[in-house]
């Protein structure tokens, strides 16, 4: 049986390093693209260095791909000019590359910072209006809408994952609501890449947290995503740690100056 051809951009970042060996173990023929990449994690992995703002790098990364998981870009709050270059222009170049190479789907790493200005503790549905908490969150809103544009005009499917706190384990009380464990991250990304006929879809990237703020029933219905990890397992130690007492769902991002 032919292997599933998957391209992972931003493969040298924190989540890229977690996902690379896991995606290969799932059976993907993986092309890892990014800056400062280490050696291949498996003999069959193809590793490419490149800037996703350059068509030559995009073409090299997407050649033969069935699906691209797009993690590349600025992952923290930055001045708007840098965010535009890394998160908007690079994404548009990626979608144009997907058109050239007939890539079927983009799995887009969106963020909880698309809704970061909602008060902490307020339950949210995906139908609730976006309320980004800064330039980074604004770029993720734009990215989700770009996915809709390229689906409506060109039929390229997109699954946008509004990733919460994707870290090994919760470290502060906010994470009891926003945590996405690595096992659940792997399962969600794999389903987003492989479940057929999803159209243009946005879901929350979050584990089965007892204190979750986000209704993720759509991910269960469309992707069959049933997370297994729960931040509540760490609640005792987390609640004894220092509490920054963030008043917005975006945590520290919501308090940063835009300039």
Image (cartoon, rainbow, N blue to C red):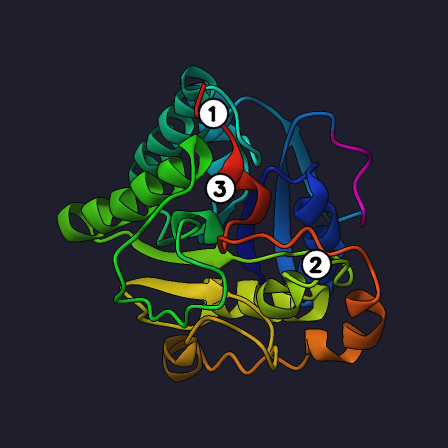
Q: Residues within 10 Å of mark 1 (few under 14, many from 20)?
A: some
Q: Which residue is mark 2?
A: 24
Residue 11 higher or lower than 213, as above or below: above
Left or right of 72? Residue 98 is left
Nearer mark to the viewer, of 1 and 2: 1
State the residue at coordinates (45%, 71%). Answer: 214
Q: Which residues are magenta?
A: 37-42
State the residue at coordinates (14%, 46%). Answer: 153
Residue 27 visible in rendering:
no
| Marks 1/2: CA–CA distance | 27 Å
Percent x, y of residue 121? 49, 68
Total labels drawn: 3
Q: Quadrant of residue 124?
A: bottom left
Q: Earlier in the sequence, mark 1 or mark 2?
A: 2
Residue 170 higher or lower than 85, as above or below: below
Q: Which residue is mark 1?
A: 86
Identify the secondary structure beneath mark 2. helix
Identify the secondary structure beneath mark 3. helix
Percent x, y of residue 8? 58, 45
């Amino acid at each position: 049986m032919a292997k599933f051809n998957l391209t992972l951009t931003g493969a040298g970042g924190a989540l890229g390093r977690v996902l690379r060996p896991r995606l290969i173990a799932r059976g993907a023929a993986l092309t890892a693209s990014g800056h400062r990449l280490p050696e291949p994690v498996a003999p069959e992995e193809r590793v490419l260095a490149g800037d996703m703002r350059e068509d030559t790098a995009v073409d090299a990364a997407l050649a033969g791909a069935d699906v691209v998981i797009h993690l590349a870009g600025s992952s923290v709050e930055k001045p708007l000019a840098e965010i535009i270059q890394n998160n908007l222009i690079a994404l548009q170049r990626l979608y144009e590359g997907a058109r050239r190479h007939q890539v079927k789907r983009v799995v887009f790493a969106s963020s909880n910072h698309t809704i970061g200005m909602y008060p902490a503790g307020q339950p949210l549905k995906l139908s609730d209006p976006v309320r980004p908490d800064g330039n980074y969150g604004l770029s993720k809103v734009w990215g989700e809408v770009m996915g809709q544009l390229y689906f409506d005009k060109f039929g390229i499917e997109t699954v946008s994952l509004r990733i919460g706190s994707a870290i090994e384990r919760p470290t502060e009380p906010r994470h009891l609501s926003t945590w996405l464990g690595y096992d659940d991250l792997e399962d969600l990304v794999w389903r987003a890449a492989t479940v057929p006929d999803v159209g243009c879809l946005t879901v929350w990237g979050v584990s089965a947290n007892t204190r979750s703020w986000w209704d993720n029933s759509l991910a269960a219905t469309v992707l069959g995503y049933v997370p297994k990890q729960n931040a509540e397992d760490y609640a005792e130690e987390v609640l004894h740690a220092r509490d920054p007492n963030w008043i917005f769902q975006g945590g520290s991002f919501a308090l940063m100056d835009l300039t």
